[in-house]
Amino acid sequence: MKRTFCYKSSDIMKELKMRKTYLLHVINFWTVTALLLSSSVSFAETTILAYGPPLLDPHGIVLSPDGTRLFITDFTANAVFSLPVTGGTPTLIASGPPFEDTRGITISPDGETLFIAGFGGGQIISLPVTGGTPTILASGSPLSHPSDVVVSRDASTLYIADNYAGAVFLLPVTGGIPTVLAAGLPFGTQDRGPTDLSLSPDESTLFVACGFNGIFRLPTTGDTPIAIVSNPPFVCTVFSSLSADGSTLFILDSAKYGAGYGYWGPGPQAIYSLPVTGGVPTLVLAEWPLVAQGFMSASHDGTTLFVADMGFADCYGWGPPDEPGRVFSLSLAPVPPTIEATVDIDPDTLNLKSQGKSITCYIELPEGYDVHNIDVSTIMLNDQVPAEPRPCGIGDYDGDGMADLMVKFNRSAVEGILEVRDEVQIRVTGDLADGTLFQGTDTIRVIDKGRK
């Protein structure tokens, strides 16, 4: 596991040495705890971009369209800053009213305008990236405590997550009265309400982080939200960020500090990656410089995640008192592509009274991929049952002229995770030799001893 810290200041190294005992506790104890949630681990290389004043309590962060600058809101400093992606001293763009207690921030596609969620004032604010006079686009009811805002690709519509109202709103970028896109259940309010939004590249879907309530997929048409991340195994999924290609969610699990709602959890603060289709999360970071919580922004090329960490300066006195707010970057391993495989489970009807020893699975890959390259040791059924190493074989089971791989799963292990139903979806996943991931599903029937 590669864990590299790239420091910008000797002062940071001094502080690190002063807290050596504390940090070893975090790295050695909480990281082990985090590994229990994850089937795979990918520790990222981190680089401190800004540390301490003028940053007091950085919350929101967004990357400019040209990928050269970050824009940051500071909840306690009541200010907006800009920062080169290479790091340095943040530049103040705006401060004072109406920027009290600001949180989420987004930027127009042309890179000219910032849109900011005024959490404390119940406002949505626009601001030129060069500073100047802010414009109040919406203020007061139906907004309560807007936590985040994202803008549509055509720069016509703002989507707003309101933490206390327990709702997602729509607002023209020209301003006006917000309209409700989704509200009420399954969203909660305050520590269970919408705190963070990500918009899919095709603009069909919003990913809504709701603290202790998990993360939901919300169609931009306003249909029923669907849970894609539940708590547990996470504790408080208060912040998330979507990769530029829309394939991966990066999730900050505020497991120790409970999103600032007086919750003292088992830890750790950790960042995970998860395919938007679901599956098993991958632990990315569960150690310094991540100490508290804040928004994240993924780079356009998928190689870097930028994190605004509020530190402990305004974190209710929790943790070491000298951990100031900071902005840091994580260098991410490239996310491997996922291909759809054709999967056929045999038998089509699984009878729990049968004395069979195994379940057979046939896997066929799309054109351009070779089943000879499948790593059998990585094949899993419903993320829980591994394929047996033997027997396995390659043939053309369905006679369609395409090779397929035959593997078997332990029957009792499979029966132990399935419910008796007429339609039970089976998901099979695995890796190819080059790191490409595959997944495929089949539907079978599961009957108990009392049914024919």
Image (cartoon, rainbow, N blue to C red):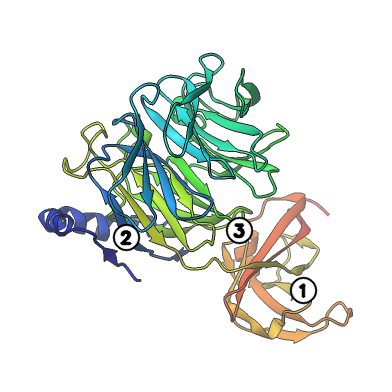
At label 2, which amino acid type do we have? Thr
> What residue is drawn where x is 58% and y is 66%?
385
Q: Amino acid at mark 1?
A: Pro
Q: Check disc 2 and report the residue beneath it.
A: 47
Q: Which mark is residue 366?
A: 1
Residue at the extreme top: 141
Q: Quadrant of the N terminus?
A: bottom left
Q: Nearer the viewer, mark 2 or mark 3?
A: 2
Residue receiving disc 3: 416
Q: Position of residue 324 (x, y in %)?
A: 22, 43
Give the answer, above or below, for where 361 lies relative to 222. Answer: below
Of discs 3 and 1, which sits in the foreground? 1
User: Which SS class for mark 2?
Assistant: strand
Quarter of the C terminus within the rendering: bottom right
Asked whether residue 44 appears in the rendered view, the answer is yes
Amino acid on which the number 3 mark rests in the picture? Gly
Tell me where residue 338 sits by quadrant.
bottom right
Front tag of 2 and 1: 2
Q: Position of residue 333 (x, y in %)?
A: 47, 68
